[in-house]
Image: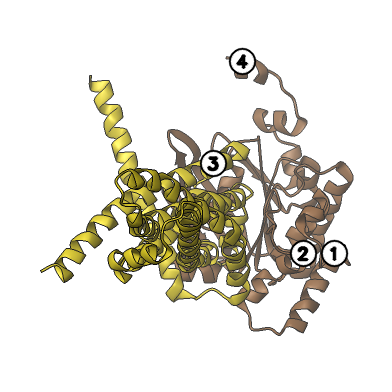
Amino acid sequence: MADHLGRFTHEFIDVIAGTGRFVRFSAAAIGGIVKGFPQRSVLAPLMMEIGLRSVAVVLATGAFVGMVLAVQTYPQLHKMGAETSSGPIINLAIVAELGPVLAAIMLAGRVGGAMAAELGTMKVTEQIDALSTMGQDPITYLVTPRFLACLVLVPILTIYSDAIGVVGGYIMAVKFFGISDYYYWYQTSQYVEKWDVGIGIWKSFYFGGAIGLICCYKGFQADQGAQGVGQATTKAFVFSFIAILVGNFFLSLFFNTLYSALYVV
Amino acid sequence: MKGFLIRLVDVYKNFNSLRVLNGINIDIRKGETFVIMGESGSGKSVILKHIIGILHPDKGQVLFDAMEIPRLEPLALAKVRQRFGMVFQGSALFDSMTVAENVSFGLHTHTDLGEDKIIGIVKEKLRLVGLTGVENKMPAELSGGMKKRVGIARAIAMNPEVILYDEPTAGLDPIMSDVISELIVRVQKTSQATSVVVTHDLKSAYKIATEIGVLNNGVIIEQGTAQEIQKTKNPFVAQFIHGEARDRIEEMMG
């Protein structure tokens, strides 16, 4: 009993210490924006890699999310004679939830995993130590530009994902299932507000920041060898995934509460 | 104590429950080439990392130019590190940069020199280590010996006062090992820098050292010139420099 308690306490303290280390790391990365805004020569290639090269995969994700939503909602609504309600159901789900969340998860895997692997490799080959010994703060030099790139580009990619998702849902619902074009968009305009689009984009800022910080942190923590880098990459994706899901839940609660406070009489 | 550029005073360091440094005392004068020798895993690289402030001691002092390295604020430490150059065991060249970008990294980060001047310095430092025409190559395209030499060129690009070498001949063939040893001697003569070299390569140590310290069980058990070390009466040092297993195999097998 005492042994179990001791082990549990030890692990609990490890978790607290690890959380503290992550908070300090994140503060240093965000503080790096003020200390020395990244140069264009460093930021531009990162934005190309994170942004431009992710467009295709994000568009594919968004398109299929929109189409499958239509495929799943139409049969149920058709049974009730309410298929014209497909519009708001599909489009609200895309802009407020599935578009931002699934785009973020895709990017956590593609971009986050790559960042963790790159920084993990730099850690185990002492390149990060080399930066320190040359008087360059590794967090400001390596993490701050990646954090900034994710913070700016994930929302932009989310907008692309939302747009193509809406198009995909429209094609399936109207062109394939034959729902009235007029009523599809009329019902959407009645129930999907700018607020809903806005919360999806605000959430994506959080998702982008979380992916950037968590994946860079895990890279910096990589243990020696190929196994260490591999584990760091896996942990980066898993922790980002958890942060996205948990953060999405609490942000959704928050925005719903805020909406009620501001607009519901 | 006056006259010493680098001092480690009663330095202790643990990693979890393992005591790696057990009361290290090292004094290095300006212009010396101090070689730290010892078995693999004895803590030699840990000493280097203390000197440049990557690691902090659990107890004791690490002094550079009378400044306590562990107590320096990050900005002050970054400034002090500009007076150092370090050559890592695996070279630690930045994978995503060309040779020229690697060598000029410190110059771009800490100086306002124009691009033409920087290119001139890069070519000169590469020529000093026997490399020409490799400026646009990526580290992945280089052999082990070439990477080591680019690492040295990068370390000396800012004309540092102190150069730290972590196992500079590790993984190299005997001829290239001697080339690197010769380069270390040449760099020291050209720059008058103080050098601290960690190695278990005896031939290299005897060639480059003005002073040798032998590390065992976390302490320096013997210190002297290459000639003095070779005439040692200490049984461990004698076993080490003659490369004899003796009863070590039994010890390892428990």
Q: What residue did someone put label 1 on?
A: B134
Give the x, y percent position of residue B22: 48, 39
Report the residue marked by disc 3: A223
Crowdedness near tag 4: few (<14), some (14–19) or many (≥20) residues, C-alpha within 10 Å? few
Marks 3 and 4, how far apart at CA: 27 Å
Q: Amino acid at mark 4?
A: Met
CA separation in Å, label 2 and label 3: 27 Å
* Residue A226 drawn above or below residue B102: above
Q: Are marks 3 and 4 on the same chain?
A: no
Secondary structure state at the residue bearing disc 4: helix
Q: Amino acid at mark 2?
A: Val
Q: Which chain is yellow?
A: A
> Who's brown, chain-wise?
B
Give the answer, above or below, for where B199 lies relative to B243.
Answer: below
What SS does tag 3 mark? loop
In the rendered view, does A17 fall on the left or right side of B199? left
Is disc 2 in contact with disc 3, using a CB cutoff of under 8 Å?
A: no
Q: What's under tag 1, amino acid-wise?
A: Val
Judging from the image, mark 1 belongs to the subunit labelled B
Q: Give neighbour class at mark 3: few <14, some 14-19, many 20+ (Cα, 10 Å).
A: some
Q: Are marks 2 and 1 on the same chain?
A: yes
Residue A217 seen in the figure = no
The residue at the point 30 percent across, 28 percent down is A7
Q: Which quadrant of the structure image shows residue A41?
A: bottom right
Disc marking residue B253? 4
The residue wearing badge 2 is B99
Mark sitting earlier along the chain (4/1): 1
Point 43% across, 36% down: residue: B16
Nearest the viewer among A163 and B155 is: A163
Q: Verify CB contact (< 8 Å) between mark 2 and mark 4.
A: no
